[in-house]
Amino acid sequence: ASQNWIYNQNQFFGGEKINFVKTHNSLCEFQGNKFTNKDQTTGAIYIVRDPRNLITSLTHHYSLTYEEAYNKLMDNDGNLLEKTNDNDHSNFTFLSSWSNHYKSWKNWKDFKVLFIKYEDIEHNKYDTFKKIVLFINNISKKKNNIDEKKLLNSIKSTNFNNLKNKEQIEGFEESVYSKETGKKKSFFNLGFNNRWEKILPKKILNKLNHNLQNELNELGYDI
């Protein structure tokens, strides 16, 4: 599913401390509970990606067929669970379907949510990064001053090729082992070169376009 960053504001030794947390959780209810609420979270940045490109990343990362990846995207009970024993659910992540995941954050009103399209990071880096900085400043009640040098350096240092090279040299914590070879897969795989038009099987494309038509249109993705 899409990736979100949330700001959790907690009392910390008599003062307030803001923590920056990455999560893949949806805000759909799971067993009567939501992942977070306005008392725990000040704001969120939600990065949404065209599901027709996302599905290719799923096939690579989890060693799935396209049909298996499609079913995962459409599964209302979808989750991620990496556990070391039967009683360890500390890494449990409730996703639901791609559509439910997206709508759960889009329709949330209890705290501010900034939506960023993954594709805007490719096509409009500067304005997208600037929008993120201004949002963070706003919810953390800081002045909206932009340090242009730091902003440009952030864009440069997080360039996909730089991150891919860094992973090849140092490794990356979130990379996984291939089911076929037992070797580590690259986490930074295709990036912006992941083009569903060239990669996605026609059968899967047609099913996604049909079942997610409303969401694709709403987000401005061509069908």
Image: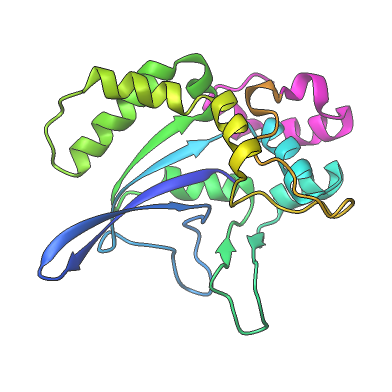
Q: Is residue 210 magenta?
A: yes
Span colored in magenta = 195-223
Q: Give the camera-side residue of 143 and 208.
A: 143
Residue at the far front: name it.
Answer: 169
Residue 216 is one of the magenta-drawn residues? yes
| Helix, strand or loop: magenta stretch | helix
Which residue occupies the foreground of this view, 48 or 103? 48
Residue 125 visible to an observer of this rendering: yes
Instruction: Left or right? Give the position of 109 relative to 1.
Output: left
Above or below residue 198? Residue 4 is below
Q: How many marks?
A: 0
| Residue at (72% x, 22% y) in the render | 195
Q: Quadrant of the C terminus?
A: top right
Towards the viewer: 193 or 196: 193
x, y percent for residue 157: 44, 26
Residue 211 is at least partly visible in this image: no
Residue at the far bottom in the pictured view: 87
On the image, which quarter does residue 77 sit in?
Answer: bottom right
Query: Is 105 on the left-hand or right-hand side of 87?
Result: left
Residue lying at 15% horizontally and 25% vertically, measured from the top left: 145
Q: Give coordinates of residue 143: x percent, y percent.
A: 11, 32
Residue, x 84% and y 41% (percent of image)?
66
Picture quarter containing residue 142? top left
At 49% from the left and 21% from the top, the residue drawn is: 120
Q: In this picture, is 140 found above or below 143?
A: below
Q: How is the image coloured?
A: rainbow
Residue 151: give x, y in percent of width and height: 31, 23
Residue 221: image location, x then y, percent? 60, 22
